[in-house]
Image (cartoon, coloured by chain):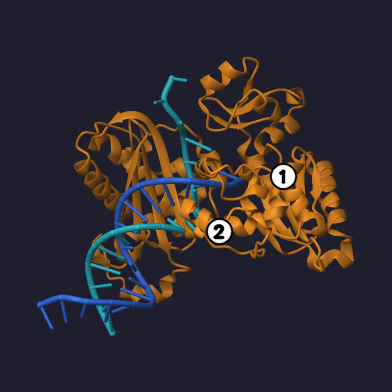
Chain colours: A orange, B cyan, C blue
DNA sequence: TCTGGGGTCCTAGGACCC
DNA sequence: TCTGGGGTCCTAGGACCC
């Protein structure tokens, strides 16, 4: 095979927990969890006891009585995650960041400067270790999919290079759940037809997979099982939607419960959209009931919006419609708002002449200019004095915050 | 002890247009 | 009046990712 393996996948190990152990030497080698009421992240030592992120703190303590909970250093997570990605960026501009702690890179164009891909991977790991004090695993392969699997196999704190001549020998003995796109449901479906390894998947006829998983998923998995992965590194990906959600425990399905929460969620989402001048046309709301089943409802407008109260009122209408259709559901446990169909970039200089003031919130009116002006004033005050300096009346009070806002921010994609 | 939060992509049916 | 096909958009739900 003529081509060489130049795709890297780098993944910081148990990132948040590793940061805590780096900052506080007394936590090293111990099972720790970031969070309290809910586990936001767990160290490898804690994972060995079955502690998982998203798990209630109480359950985690039962599994691991000696578990130490720490309050997160959220600012440091952002700083160190950015720094680790920047180390990779020192080798090549072709970096595709997947999340705060994970990125792909293509080093094809810089081997003449820095050595083989394996040497570059070693240098990255060394620098992240010495400069940031953090373990990072790296996979090197000819495709993104295989590089990602290699880094998973390399964990914790390892490096795996897959030679292009022995790709399938490496890939085929592995279990299907290591593949991108195989979660619990797909794994179970494949198990029904006796497919447990990637090699078995590769030998399964295409029509059989497509019948089992649908045309798109079937075709995709079949290709990946033979390491046919055409995806390239894309360094500038724009978000396609922005949302926020809040688990609220178990509360009555009443206006006085959902209205303040929706205003708060709308505030979070709309503020982000305004900050990047990216209004959106589709508003989707999700309501989860007591039994954790959930229902969504959406509306697509003629014109994009990003005014907080317009979004909040549209969301309220959608939630009312959901509740009207589910009269037997008396308890709700989560509310979510998402805005999609967001514009590339909205230019006020161009749009303002058409945005006549009094249009209010009528779908199809341009943005709701009067309310937008009020939002801009709020945004400015928050820029200077912080988020909590000003807010939308009732929304400022009584919002249950299972998860700190700083933690939410870490998961937000750049718009 | 019922399970956090922010995203992407796919599917399937229906409306609507040519 | 009934027939057909292609394409796009919208909606709701679901699987999956970090």
| x and y percentages locating residue A154 in the rendered image | 76, 42
Image coordinates of residue A17 in percent, x first then y, are 67, 33
* Residue beneath the point at 88% across and 54% down: A119
Is residue A87 in view? no
Image position, residue A170 (x, y; %): 76, 49
A346 and B11: which is toward the camera: B11
Give the numbered dot on residue A206: 2
- Which comes sooner in the sequence, label 1 or label 2? 1
Residue located 65% across and 28% down the image: A47
Tell me if residue A334 can be seen.
Answer: yes
> Could you tell me which quadrant the N terminus of chain A lies in?
bottom right
| Residue at (62% x, 18% y) in the render | A64
Q: Secondary structure at mark 2?
A: helix
Residue shown at 50%/60% (left/top)? Answer: A216
Dot 1, crowdedness within 10 Å: few (<14), some or many (≥20)?
few
Subunit that carries the residue with mark 2: A
Front residue of A218/A149: it is A218
The answer to whether A317 is drawn above or below residue A230 in the figure is: above
Q: Label 1: which residue?
A: A173
Q: Which mark is residue A369?
A: none
Nearer the observer: mark 1 or 2; the answer is: 2
In three-dimensional space, the C-alpha distance between marks 1 and 2, rounded to whole angstroms, equals 20 Å
Q: Quadrant of residue A307?
A: bottom left
Q: Is residue B4 left or right of residue A64?
A: left
């Amino acid at each position: 095979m003529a081509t060489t393996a130049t795709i890297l996948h780098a993944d910081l190990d148990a990132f948040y927990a590793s940061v805590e152990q780096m900052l506080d030497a007394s936590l090293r080698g111990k099972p720790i969890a970031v969070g309290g009421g809910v586990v936001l992240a767990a160290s490898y030592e804690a994972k060995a006891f079955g502690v998982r992120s998203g798990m209630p703190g109480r359950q985690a303590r039962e599994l691991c009585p000696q578990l130490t909970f720490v309050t997160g250093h959220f600012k440091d997570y952002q700083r160190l995650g950015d720094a680790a990605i920047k180390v990779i960026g020192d080798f090549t501009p072709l970096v595709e960041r997947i999340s705060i702690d994970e990125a792909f890179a293509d080093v094809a164009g810089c081997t003449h400067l820095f050595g083989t891909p394996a040497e570059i991977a070693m240098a990255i790991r060394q620098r992240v270790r010495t400069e940031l004090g953090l373990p990072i695993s790296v996979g090197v392969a000819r495709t993104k999919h295989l590089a990602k699997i290699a880094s998973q196999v390399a964990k914790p704190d390892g490096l795996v290079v897959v030679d292009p001549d022995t790709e399938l020998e490496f890939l085929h003995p592995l279990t299907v759940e290591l593949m991108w796109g195989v979660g619990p449901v797909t794994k179970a479906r494949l198990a029904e037809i006796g497919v447990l390894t990637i090699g078995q998947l590769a030998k399964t006829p295409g029509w059989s997979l497509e019948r089992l998983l649908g045309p798109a998923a079937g075709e995709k998995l079949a290709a990946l099982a033979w390491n046919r992965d055409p995806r390239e590194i894309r360094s500038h990906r724009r978000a396609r939607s922005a949302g926020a959600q809040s688990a609220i425990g178990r509360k009555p399905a009443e206006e006085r419960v959902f209205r303040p929460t929706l205003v708060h969620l709308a505030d979070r989402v709309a503020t982000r959209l305004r900050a990047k001048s990216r209004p959106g046309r589709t508003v989707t709301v999700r309501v989860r009931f007591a039994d954790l089943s959930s229902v969504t409802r959406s509306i697509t407008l003629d014109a994009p919006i990003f005014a907080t109260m317009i979004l909040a009122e549209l969301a309220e209408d959608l939630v009312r419609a959901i509740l009207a259709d589910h009269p037997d559901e008396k308890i709700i446990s989560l509310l979510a708002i998402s805005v999609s169909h967001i514009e590339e970039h909205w230019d006020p200089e161009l749009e303002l002449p058409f945005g006549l003031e009094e249009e209010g919130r009528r779908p199809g009116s341009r943005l709701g200019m009067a309310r937008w002006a009020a939002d801009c004033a709020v945004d400015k005050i928050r820029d200077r004095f912080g988020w909590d300096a000003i807010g939308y009346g009732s929304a400022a009070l009584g919002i249950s915050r299972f998860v700190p806002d700083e933690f939410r921010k870490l998961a937000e994609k750049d718009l």
